[in-house]
Amino acid sequence: MELFTLLVNPADIDAERIAEAMRENIGEAASVRDDVELRRVPLTGGTGIVCVLAGASEEEAAKARCAAARPLAAAIIEGYERTLLDRCIAKEVGADDREGAAEVRAQCDKQLASRAEGDVFYERRVAKLAGAIEAYLAEERFLHVEGFLRFRAEPYLEELRDSVAYAVDEWMMERQYQEFIALLKYFVYIQEAKIPAAHVVHHGNHDFTLLNERMLPIDTKQMDQFVVELIDKDISYEDVIVSTLISVSPGKLYVHSRTPDEQVIKTILTIFEGRAELCTDCAVCLPRLEERGGK
């Protein structure tokens, strides 16, 4: 019984390798290792892979089609996914925004780059594509891989579109954040200093102490209303720190922290670039950091 014939583009799918992978899977799943034959034949438009299962029952044929679907799905993902993603990204971002497309692509790669068995995102894509392949082969005996991708692989393509949409959202939020930081940075740049210096003592997580040049606490409630509106209506504690510092406009800002890689510290240093200095163990901050850490 001829189960199916595949037409693959050898530039994208290694016909010999996929035929061997399907032979192994079919032989194990249908317990017909000696009866299954996969031969490669030249066809117009690429390489044909013909699967023949001698003397197979309908139950064995169904198991064989299911077994063949997963390695074919994996080969399609390996051969075509990058191109498919790039098309989705170009549609979402615009063909002319190469920088934006590259940033979205990098975001997609964080989620989709792994093609290792067991990776949840990979397994989900393989399962959706394999399910569509199995359903198609139950009805048809000839599968043109590129035509199938275009017209019958909607569950898998929808998964890619969802991933791209998520990546675009992340990219847009990051771009807006960077534009906002640049605005605050410019606002600080054009402001004249109101106090000689300020100290931000970061005790970890959301625990901060703000001190003026005389090492007296700065009242975080005394914020410029314009700055508050500039930051956000849903203001976080980190926003309070930033907005207070912008409002008091120190000529010099000393940031004392033992965790300088935390995002809030990086943000403060970026906004007050040129005025800010980072330290982790000076005579001012060391006693305070040790005192708070020992509580």
Image (cartoon, grey):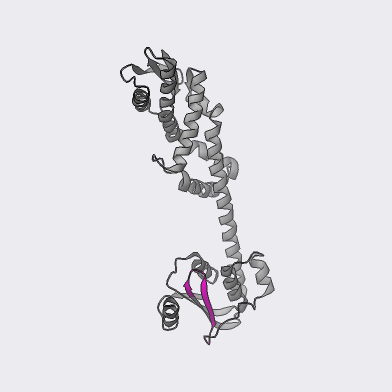
Q: Quadrant of the C terminus?
A: bottom left
Q: Residue furthest left?
A: 34
Q: Relative to 156, say whether 201 is above or below.
A: below
Q: Nearer the viewer, residue 8 or 244?
A: 244
Q: Relative to 141, say whether 266 is above or below.
A: below
Q: Position of residue 41 (x, y in %)?
A: 38, 17
- Viewer can see residue 236: yes
Residue at 44% x, 38% y is: 123
- Viewer can see residue 274: no
Q: Quadrant of the N terminus?
A: top left
Q: Is residue 208 magenta?
A: yes
Q: Residue furthest bottom?
A: 214
Q: Position of residue 187 (x, y in %)?
A: 62, 70
Q: Magenta stretch? A: 202-214
Overall secondary structure of the magenta stretch? strand
Query: Quadrant of residue 117 in the image?
Result: top left
Residue at 45% x, 40% y is: 122
Residue at 49% x, 32% y is: 129
Q: Relative to 182, say whether 136 is above or below.
A: above
Q: Is 229 placed left or right of 108 in the picture?
A: right
Q: Is 37 placed left or right of 79 in the picture?
A: left
Q: Is 239 placed left or right of 74 in the picture?
A: right
Q: Position of residue 64 (x, y in %)?
A: 41, 22
Q: Relative to 9, say whether 277 is above or below.
A: below
